[in-house]
Image: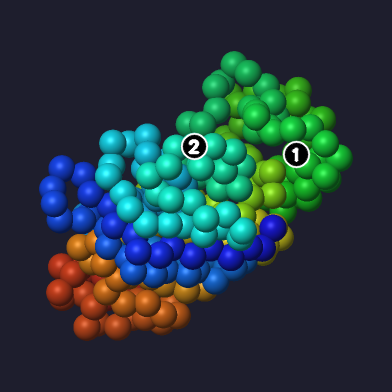
Amino acid sequence: MTAGMKLTDVRVYYSSNEPVLDLPILEPEPGKITVIAGPTGSGKSTLGHAVAGLLPFMGARAVGTIHLGEHALPLDSVRKWRGICGKLVRWIPQEPARAFTATRPLLGQMLEGIEDDLKINEQLVTLLEVAGLPDPPELSRSYPFEFSGGMLQRAALVSAFLPDPMIVVADEPTAHLDPPRSLDLARTVTRLVRQASVTLLWITHDLRMASAVADHVVFLSEGRIEAEGEPGLLLDPSLYEPLSIVYASARLAQPL
């Protein structure tokens, strides 16, 4: 489902009077991959938590509004986010493979909380094929311990793209992977985004991976947007020194 998302006048506080995130406006392009990059402490994960509707449950003090299609969602409203989290907005954790219990059939876990209807079943078959996974009957007979870590990660990704969400947030999904597996997962995510026409926010500190998957880049520093533009923005050396990531130039020069 391609749908627009816009954040307006977003400010998030924890223990201090200074906001850890301060965004007057952010409007990712529908159906594209927007990479949220920046150094540790720049507000990347806080932005992901805001978009996923998790801030009301994390003890944060937040103001501002996220617009998802026709929905206007205040960041601090638990009531308004009910029915949105896990449906219109889906979350891919840092270690997707750990989302599954080893002793329960895999397909049932992938579809947990999702209504069983013809549309979902048709979409599931298509996404499994895109991700290179077995068909539903085989997955319904199989257990997570029978699959490799890479296949479980792809299964978690497929689950995140059901049931027809507006937004998917991926929080450092390649953080614990070696380069070949990182690239494989990135390629799978890219294929799923194109197939499902979903807006994806990819949160990462890995600029090489960001340059490989991004349609658009938002660079955060100290909770504010330092720069925004096309993936080539990541090659701008003027960004690196003030953000204390001079090493990024050398890393980007290495082939993926």
Q: Where does residue 60 sit, x and y in percent of width and height? A: 28, 42
Tell me what residue is drawn at x 15 percent, y 74 percent. Answer: 242
Report whether residue 250 is seen.
no
The three-letter code of the residue at mark 1 reads Pro
Judge the density around disc 2: few (<14), some (14-19), many (≥20) Cα neighbours within 10 Å.
Answer: few
Query: Where does the N terminus fall, quadrant-wise?
Result: bottom right
Is 248 left or right of 174, judged from the image as shown?
left
Rendered image: mark on residue 134: 1
Q: Name the element at disc 1.
A: loop
Q: Where does residue 222 sit, x and y in percent of width and height? A: 20, 63
Query: Which of the 4 image quadrants contains residue 104?
Result: top right
Q: Where does residue 192 sit, x and y in percent of width and height? A: 65, 56
Is 196 left or right of 252, judged from the image as shown?
right
Vertical comparison of 144 with 166: above or below: above
Check the image and name the residue furthest to the right. 118
Is 135 left or right of 229, judged from the image as shown?
right
Tell me what residue is drawn at x 54 percent, y 37 percent. Answer: 82
- Number of marks present in the image shown: 2
The three-letter code of the residue at mark 2 reads Arg
Which is nearer the eye, 113 or 95?
113
Q: Name the element at disc 2.
A: helix
Report whether residue 52 is seen.
yes
Rendered image: mark on residue 151: none
Is label 2 in contact with label 1 (beta carbons under 8 Å)? no
Which numbered disc, 2 or 1, marks the residue closer to the eye? 2
Check the image and name the residue furthest to the top. 103
Tell me what residue is drawn at x 13 percent, y 48 percent. Answer: 16
